[in-house]
Structure formats: C-alpha cells, structure tokens
C-alpha cells in the first residue's frame, strides 16, 4: 500500500490500522550505519584528566625549557589532545633563577614594553629581570609560545614558577620529569 494512501486510509480506519501506519513510518526512516573503524575522541572540560608536573630549571636553556613547558601546558604530549580545550597539565618550575642563557644573550637581548603614556617605552635585559623578579623571565618566554587567545590566557594560569627548590604544591603529589622526557 502506498504511504500517501495509507495516511489517508488511517484517518478513517480503526486504531489497529493506525498502529500499522506507525510501524511503516519507522521502517521507512533511513538508518545510518557506522562505517568508520575508529572514532575521533574529543576531550572536554569534564573528561580531561589534569596532572601536576615539576620541572627543575637548573642550567637549562631558557628557550628549550619554555618550549617544552608550553607543550605540557597545552596538552600536546597527551594522546587525547584537543586544540580548543585546556587539556594540559599543571606545571611547576623550580630553581628559575638558575636558568641558562648562552653567549651574550643575558646582556645583549632587550625586552621592550610600553606603559601607555607618551615617551613610555621601557627597555630591560634578562640580567635586570633576573635581578628583580626571576620568575618573570620564564613566564614571559612561555607565554610567548602559547596561543594568543582566551585559551592561552587560561593556560598560563596553570604555570607555577618558584625561585628556590621548594614549592607549596606537595599536596597535589606532582611527578618530577626531566626536559628530555617530554
């Protein structure tokens, strides 16, 4: 029986015929078959498993350290990496005052910032930054290697930098990793 004729027929027929109509409608629906052999798993805020990681910055090159820390913060070392989700680990960097800069970079490299006022351009070197706030040098290097979006602003908050070998995050049971293990 044709579907259109069945519809017209069911309006005047008994309830038993109308049940048959619903059965036919359900049979006519297109069923999708899962043809892929794998499914792409995208993490979200609820399914991400964040860990705590400690990295010792003693005698490590600043750029190499910052690039590896950015990888861990972003979550690219995990198999379920999702680009639009904060799926990285929390990173603790200790001994930041002992970070190494090769050659004359400690004095010749210049960081520029602007206060927002006329004539407010300020210049500093890594030596001056290490003397005043050693944590700022690593934070600035890592922030430059993260996305320049709202996600990048959230990711930098997962970075904790301390001057000495001690940190207050013992309750999180962080695991210590070496730079070449990342």
Image (cartoon, rainbow, N blue to C red):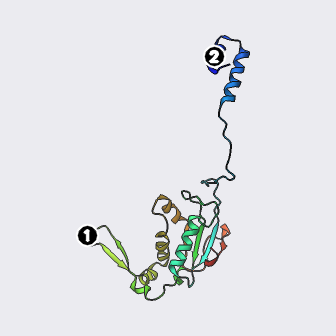
Give the left or right position of residue 169, taking residue 122 as reference: right
Quadrant location of the C terminus in the rendered image: bottom right
Residue linked to disc 1:
118
Name the outermost residue toward the right.
Answer: 16
Q: Secondary structure at mark 2?
A: helix
Residue 52: name its quadrant: bottom right
Real-space CA distance between mark 2 and mark 1, rounded to the nearest whole angstrom: 82 Å
Nearer to us in this view, 163 or 25: 25
Q: Secondary structure at mark 1?
A: loop
Give the left or right position of residue 29, taking residue 138 as reference: right
Q: Is 35 placed above or below 71 here?
A: above
Nearer to us in this view, 87 or 96: 87
Name the outermost residue toward the top.
Answer: 12
- What residue is drawn where x is 60% and y is 76%? 55
- What residue is drawn where x is 67% and y is 36%? 31
Q: Position of residue 5 (x, y in %)?
A: 63, 16
- Which dot marks residue 74? none
- Mark 2 vs 1, N-terminal side: 2
Q: Position of residue 10 (x, y in %)?
A: 66, 15
Residue 107: name its quadrant: bottom left
Q: Position of residue 23 (x, y in %)?
A: 71, 25
Name the outermost residue toward the bottom.
Answer: 103
Q: Residues within 10 Å of mark 2 (few under 14, many from 20)?
A: few
Q: Residues within 10 Å of mark 1 (few under 14, many from 20)?
A: few
Name the outermost residue toward the front.
Answer: 1
Residue linked to disc 2:
5
Nearer to us in this view, 97 or 23: 23
Quadrant location of the N terminus in the rendered image: top right
């Amino acid at each position: 029986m044709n579907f259109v004729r069945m519809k017209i027929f069911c309006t005047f027929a008994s309830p038993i015929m109308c049940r048959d109509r619903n059965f036919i409608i359900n049979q006519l629906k297109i069923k999708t078959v899962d043809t892929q052999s794998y499914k792409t798993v995208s993490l979200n805020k609820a399914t991400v498993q964040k860990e705590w990681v400690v990295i010792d910055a003693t005698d490590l090159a600043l750029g190499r350290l910052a690039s590896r820390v950015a990888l861990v913060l972003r979550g690219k070392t995990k198999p379920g990496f999702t680009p639009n989700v904060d799926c990285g680990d929390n990173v603790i960097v200790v001994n930041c005052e002992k970070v190494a800069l090769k050659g004359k970079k400690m004095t010749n490299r210049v960081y520029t910032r602007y206060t927002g006022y006329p004539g407010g351009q300020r210049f500093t070197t890594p030596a001056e930054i290490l003397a005043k706030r050693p944590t700022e040098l690593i934070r600035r290097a890592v922030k430059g290697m993260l996305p320049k979006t709202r996600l990048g602003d959230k990711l930098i908050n997962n970075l904790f930098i301390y001057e000495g070998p001690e940190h207050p995050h013992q309750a999180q049971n962080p695991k210590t990793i070496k730079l070449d293990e990342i």
